[in-house]
Amino acid sequence: MRATLRWAHADLRTHRGEALFIVSATAGIVAALLLAAALFGYATNPWQRVFAQSHGAHVWIHTGPAADPGRLADLDGVEAVSGPFRTSAATVASRGARASVELRGAGAEPPATGRPLLTSGRWLTPATPDGVVLESSLARALVAGPGDSLTVPATGRTLTVVGVADSAEPRYRPGERSGTVWALPDRVRDTGDRPGHVVGLLLADPGDTDYAVQRAVTVLGAGAVTDVSSWQQARSEAQGDTRLLGQVLGLFGLGALLAAALAVFGAISTRVRGHLRDISVLKAIGFTPGQVVRVFLVQHLAFAVLGALVATVLIETLGSAVPGRLGEAVGVWQGLPGHTAALLAVPVAAVLFIGATTCLAAWRAGRVPPVPVLPTGKAPGGRLSGPARRALGLGLPPGLVLGWHRAFARGPQTPATIVRLALPLLLITVALSAWTTIARFDSKPAELGLPSALTARADSGLADREAAALLDGHPQVVAAHPGVEVAALVPGQTGTIALRGLGTRERPYPFTVAEGRAAAGPDEAVAGQGLLDLLGVEIGDWVRMTVGGHPQVLHIVGRSIEPENGGRTISTSLDTLRENDPALRATLYQLQLRAGADPAAVRAELTEASQGRLDIHEVTSPADRLSTMRGVVAGLIAVLALIGLTELSTAIGGSVRDGERNLLALKAIGLSPRQITAVTVTAVGCTALAAAVVGAGLGVPLAHWLIDAEGRSSGIGAGIAQVPSPLHLLLLATAAVLGAIALAALPAARAARRRLVDTLSAVA
């Protein structure tokens, strides 16, 4: 045992850099996997916590004023009912911000089912008749809290915020979903318009949600139901882009784990080839093959354990201090029940996976004979190929020719080294593709379903012509497309989708069509991927839906990229909807701005020009919600680069050792130490270049497929991927080659200047 420890200690002192790389790479990989676990927990559990504590309803059904939703309590499978509550629609303003809200009547005691969880302030009391409680996402949008006042421009009333509460219902989304405001029933009746009711159903079996909705709509009548939302929809929105962050971290963490395992395997294999004499000496003094295997295996397992411990300690102690969503996710994850199990399972799994890959290489070390011999008839460097001989005959520098020959004439070792080095470069290419895709939402939003920068909604006192003239008259507005967006019941009446009528046939709205064609004729429409998946339809099918009790039949002629509403949107022209309802008027305008125009400045100018009669919001880009991913991608690239450096150091060590075996021959044919150094440096550079070509060549199509697959699963749809430009790929390859050359220069120069007696002892 003492001899084993002394040999391991001597080997560690000789290869400190390689050991540090392995420890650092393992720490980075385990940290990425732990962050992925934290983000997954953060994405799911906060909503689950709110849902459980509030005894949340699985289904919320909105009806007109004439319906009697109380009858739904008698449906089979319904355990409890929240409400029904009287509702009305209104627009509220606070500190210059405006929002469409649903006023919901509630008593002095919160309901037992679907109970809002107060985060600040207090609940409603008759002592404050104008008091309201805001749902937390609406409160953030209005920058309002307890004690603040809200105004209702349509009636001139003032409401006082007395509390803010979390809810398990779908959250507020400007221009798409109204925010929830709880108020006393009398205030709901006096303040808003478009009266109605809302009822929540707590089901015995959440898996029967669609069936329960279908029965509820049948009981109430399709014309009475205006909107339906389910717990699955609310959970999906709550998870949102945080779940995407977790998926990205998990994917790259597993890829990095594989790359690191291969790098460790290559390091041990190269060390076995470079220490044949040492292994033979160990066996000559009495080490058994099993002891040799244990020496290599335990040594590298110790590196992996040390890296995993470093990562675990850093994430546990400093993870919550990371600014932004990552730090918040770690803080929430640390308080969840499964935190301890994940904190132990992830590092252990990573260490076991790395250990499994080292077993084969360590087993090969145990099979080294006490007196190593070269295979019969095989020269150390391989026979000089015909092209290499012809290149030397043409007068090309011998250092370059022999270096190229050494890089690609090492038998099966060459492709194995290229594959191990190409894997981190492949993952870096995928990470860069994710970065450029996010940047595309900022630089080219029109190509990704966001041709409009602003959405304007006119008050009831502003006529359509006056609103259109006011918007079109602004010098920075290219086009103001009138439109309307309503909730429609899908076939089977198990849920609602967004039906949009935008633009006219004379001035069509520029939908981003990824498949098929744009809607041009009567009854033609384009749909998002989420809607196609929800209904199980394809381009060319006809879809029947119910809007306010009236059927609407549309022919899907194309698939559009829809970043909002999970892609569950079908869009046609406003003229098509007016054919079914001639009295339909535009409720919103999508504004296209000139290139370089400042949306915030245009919004302020239009608001002032309309004297507050236009409610204007900036269109939210997915890039705003994915901004956290840029830091994540940068961190992943750093981890992958570290793994690449680990493999590169192994490749350099192997090439240097090959050069030491050939050093006598190279000096015998008259090569100078500088030329011998050039041989090793060229061999390493050619290996790095081949790996960069393979990594980029496979990484680009893989990144395109992965990003489009994520787009399809999220409902946005395929066609959003943006791979790095050829210039960026060239810079990546150049950086890899120049880095390899720079790292190889010093050890190659040292090896080329070794004394002949040292060389003889090394190859003996």
Image: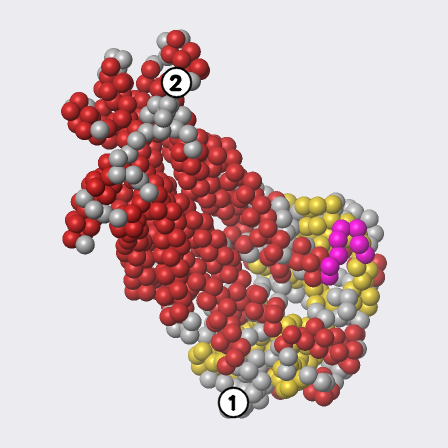
Q: Residues within 10 Å of mark 2 (few under 14, many from 20)?
A: few
Q: Is 541 covered by the magenta stretch?
A: yes
x and y percentages locating residue 162 in the rendered image: 48, 81
Question: What is the secondary structure assignment of the residue under circle 2?
Answer: loop
Q: Is 729 covered by the magenta stretch?
A: no
x and y percentages locating residue 652 in the rendered image: 31, 33
Q: Is residue 71 left or right of residue 356?
A: right
Residue at 18% in and 29% down: 761
Residue 338, by quadrant, is: bottom left
Residue at 34% in and 41% down: 269
Identify whether 287 is placed above or below 41.
Answer: above
Q: Residues within 10 Å of mark 1 (few under 14, many from 20)?
A: some
The stretch of residues the image draws in magenta is 535-542
Give the farthest residue toward the top: 394
Q: Can you identify the residue that label 1 sits on? A: 125
Task: Tell how many labels.
Answer: 2
x and y percentages locating residue 250 in the rendered image: 46, 56
Q: Can you identify the residue that label 2 sits on? A: 384
Residue 669 visible to the viewer: yes
